[in-house]
Image (cartoon, rainbow, N blue to C red):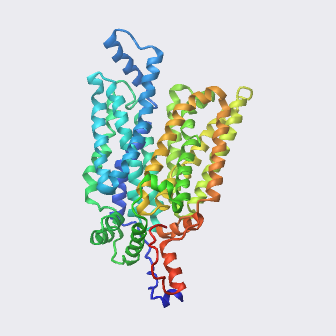
Amino acid sequence: MENKEAGTPPPIPSREGRLQPTLLLATLSAAFGSAFQYGYNLSVVNTPHKVFKSFYNETYFERHATFMDGKLMLLLWSCTVSMFPLGGLLGSLVVGLLVDSCGRKGTLLINNIFAIIPAILMGVSKVAKAFELIIFSRVVLGVCAGISYSALPMYLGELAPKNLRGLLGTMTEVFVIVGVFLAQIFSLQVILGNPEGWPVLLALTGVPALLQLLTLPFFPESPRYSLIQKGDEAAARQALRRLRGHMDLEAEVEDMHVEAQAERAEGHLSVLRLCALQSLRWQLFSIIVLMAGQQLSGINAINYYADTIYASAGVEAAYSQYVTVGSGVVNIVMTLTSAVLVERLGRRRLLLAGYGICGSACLVLTVVLLFQNKVSELSYLGIICVFAYIAGHSIGPSPVPSVVRTEIFLQSSRRAAFMVDGAVHWLTNFIVGFLFPSIQEAIGAYSFIIFAGICLLTAVYIYVVIPETKGKTFVEINRIFAKRNRVKLPEEKKEEIIDAGPPAPSPAKETSF
């Protein structure tokens, strides 16, 4: 009754969004061109690594009339692998500037430069007899992946209606996994993972980028970016009409106006100001925990140790690549399952179920590795544990954080939040890849107990802190976190002033949540 007395109009009911052709095709163009090539580059050097090392050695011999020693080869190959996440870290630090100045779609289009140029360089590296081109290209591809990892979920999350935000948000991880899987297929020795085919194998990363350059310009920019940051309501409405396929847009436009008012009250946030604001404290903690938990829970370590587990089960080295392809199939199936279930079961359930499966698999795998020499049959259980872990990670910890990190921040803080999010993602990715071999050598099978503990701690945090965001608008999610942060939103303060009667003669101007 108070709202009616104050003259506040009743809320406009929101119409359920559907996966219209324009929305579907825009998602496919953006995700295939960005997430797919990220996943492809993540995996393409793993299976045929012996072929690449042979090229490094042969090139070195032609220059110096002697082969590399083991230490130099290890250093060069470590650089080849580790430059990718370091480039990703650099990309995550510049993405904020790009998405604000060029827009979400514009950033994805510009980012294709960082995929096409290294694809050409790697494709000619054999003819040029320069393995340095591969190492340099891995850095540039990492920059491309770092930008994609932040800009793509932002674009898809802002295109989607609230009832499809989970489905479209998981498309980032779905296409990453598809890229990983196709890289595993193309890397088979009988296809391109051989001394003759590897330049083509590496150059293929430019194909998705080229296709995106040809298709994405025909789809609209993020409506939220157009209205909230550019102030162009006409462009936002035009984009919404194409994406939704109907003219009933008032509820969604009104939601954007509410978010725009919140942005004007809060101001545009830098990373330092984001870290200092009490009103965004638990949101910031949450994305740090989600990103760190995703990487530190052991997914890269499982991939690294998988060949050893397969070998201990009696799988010959020549056939382990096919078992790896089998794990890729499990990855794709469970990620697609997550995409289907995320709007039905919600974000929290998938995250908790995924971490529960991963933690249990790590504990059982520890027992297997400790006792497989005494009980040979346990080796086969080790393969089951690897597949179970991949399934658990694919249903929750891998795809769902991309959805949640878009939902828990408003437009004004999303840019800075994604910079923090990306930095944590790539730093933890690098740390696991760099330190796990040493940790595994020092404590052996017990290293997986550490990952089980991280899974447990992350699950506890999710259960206690992170709310269910399914079916809620960005503003509604912001109100939930405002209570946890123990702050009042601007509209709540205005209601208190109205309830209290006429304002004091010289009220203080409120400029923050």
Return the x and y of residue 330 as percentages of the image width and height. 53, 45
Return the x and y of residue 503 as percentages of the image width and height. 48, 83
Q: Is residue 458 left or right of residue 141?
A: right
Q: Which residue shows up at 58% across the image and 68% down it?
A: 483
Looking at the image, is 68 positioned above or below residue 436? above
- How many numbered marks are there? 0
Looking at the image, is 455 positioned above or below residue 100? above
Residue 323 in sight: no
In the foreground, 289 or 311: 289
Q: Residue most toward the top?
A: 65
Q: Which residue shows up at 62% across the image and 45% down it?
A: 358
Q: Is residue 206 left or right of residue 446?
A: left
Displayed quadrant of residue 183: top left
In the foreground, 496 or 81: 496
Looking at the image, is 513 positioned above or below residue 495? above
Residue 338 in sight: yes
Return the x and y of residue 344 as percentages of the image width and height. 55, 64
Return the x and y of residue 16 as percentages of the image width and height. 44, 73
Displayed quadrant of residue 17: bottom left
Looking at the image, is 362 positioned above or below residue 513? above
Q: Which residue shows up at 43% across the image and 59% down it?
A: 413
Q: Which residue shows up at 33% across the image and 77% down it?
A: 247
Q: Residue most toward the right?
A: 374
Q: Is residue 64 left or right of residue 172?
A: left
In the foreground, 75 or 45: 75
The quadrant of the rendering that contains the N terminus is bottom right
